[in-house]
Amino acid sequence: MDTAKIKSFVEGLWDAEIVPELVEYIRIPNKSPMFDPKWVEHGYMEQVVGRFEAWAKAKLAGLAGASVEVVRLEGRTPLIFIDIPGAGAETVLLYGHLDKQPEMTGWADDLGPWTPVIKGDKLYGRGGADDGYAMFGALSAILALRDQGLDHARCVVVIEACEESGSYDLPYYVDHLAERIGAPSLVVCLDSGCGNYDQLWLTTSLRGMTGGALSVQVLEEGVHSGDASGVVPSSFRILRELLSRLEDPATGQILPAALHAEIPEERAAQARRAADALGQEVFAKFPFVEGMQPVTDDVTQLVLNRTWRPQLAITGLEGAPNLENAGNVLRPMTAAKLSLRLAPTTDGATAGELVKTLLERDPPYGAKVEFKLEKASTGWNAPALASWLEQAVEKASQTAFGRPAAMMGEGGSIPFMGMLGEKFPAAQFVITGVLGPHSNAHGPNEFLHIPTGKRVSISIASILVDHFAATRG
């Protein structure tokens, strides 16, 4: 592999075509179905699928046997299926998604979720890094190899449109396409994070998650707080009490032992090495207010907290007016959206039922308490790296970044990985991505670090070459 030519090809394609395509992609508010129930009527998802399909077909037009297809199952989000023939009998599966999180508040005055802005080497806007770049990154890597006449295994690229809603449509497509996908010996997922922008990061585990809407109702309608307080229990206080069954309010520790899992020593050792590599950047990357501190000053424990320990976040509230309209009324109800991250090896469905039972049983004062379970997915713990892949990852990082590779679990969830791990237990996995410090996926001011997008693409090209060399015999 001529490294200089690979870099030149990938960087040139990114500058000339991929970044402009991502600029147009960011403009389209193709929110995931959970956040846009009328996604079919709005047509934004179709706009993105059409753009992605057209670009892929144009780039692969001269490649014999390659195909680009939008697969549609009735009542489900579409899926882009790209099949690129290769040498040998092996198959590589490359994955990404094109649906987006909702707008979120707090964007800088000159930025916005659907307003692409390039500042220096960052492309701001919703979805560029999570995960619009994935198809382009995968195809740029493959096209770079083709440009040099280098052999690679058959590559299947799958781009779904439901990941931010928990990938509930994806299992149906994987089953529908099972014969066409085959049995990949390598799975590459480009939807993860990186601890910094200086080296290739491999994700070794992903947390699962469960969650839903917890509502507490105490009255049929609001009443004067001066008349009712001290007689009618506050719905907010009851909700706070219920949450204390799940989480220690002083420490944030999740209380039920069944929601915890033993941390493998290998993962603990990787956490220590990641902590050494990143230092205070583990927490300094977050936009803390002045004087705010992380939950502990032990960086290794912070890494383990966000990768292997269950953690609760309240992501939405309902039932209260904004402050300027908050009269002296004892409100009839309070509701909260709960997002509970789970250890990679904790069963998501079992955890979800446990949380529902815990929150709904014996409601204080006989209040009307309901927990609507909306999502429950199991995480993923990577199989041990084959020696060839361990060497290939290190080589790829040195080639693209000039630094050694690093490994760390991620706190997010990619439901697809657990599913693929079960379906293809013999496969090796490369889980990586561009979501590094301050990139703020799902939040305001999200950005794609363009140089990292290029380098991850170059890394994948290098790994595909080494995969072919390792498996052709």
Image (cartoon, grey):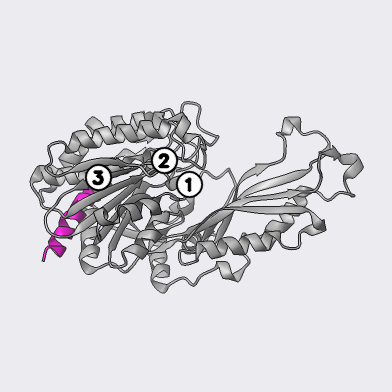
Measuring from the top left, give residue 263's x and y in whole percent.
46, 70
> Left or right: 439 with respect to 9?
right
Disc 2 residue type? Asp
Tell me which corner region of the image, top left, top right, bottom left or bottom right, holds residue 72. top left
Q: Earlier in the sequence, mark 1 or mark 2?
A: 2
In the rendered image, residue 276, in percent from the top left (x then y), is placed at 39, 61
Q: Nearer the viewer, mark 2 or mark 3?
A: 3
Label 1, residues with CA under 10 Å away: few <14, some 14-19, many ≥20: some
Outermost residue toward the top in this view = 110
> Within 10 Å of the Cα at label 3, are there few (<14), some (14-19), or many (20+) other Cα atoms?
many
122 is higher (above) or lower (below) than 185: above
How far apart marks 1 and 2 lie (CA) works out to 9 Å
Answer yes or no: is residue 305 visible. yes
Residue that appears at 45% across and 61% down: 379
Question: On the image, numbered disc 3 is attached to which residue?
Answer: 82
Provide the residue span drawn in magenta: 457-473
Q: Is residue 150 magenta?
A: no
Task: Inspect the magenta stretch and tell me whether residue 461 lies in it.
Answer: yes
* Element on which disc 1 rests: helix
The residue wearing badge 1 is 165
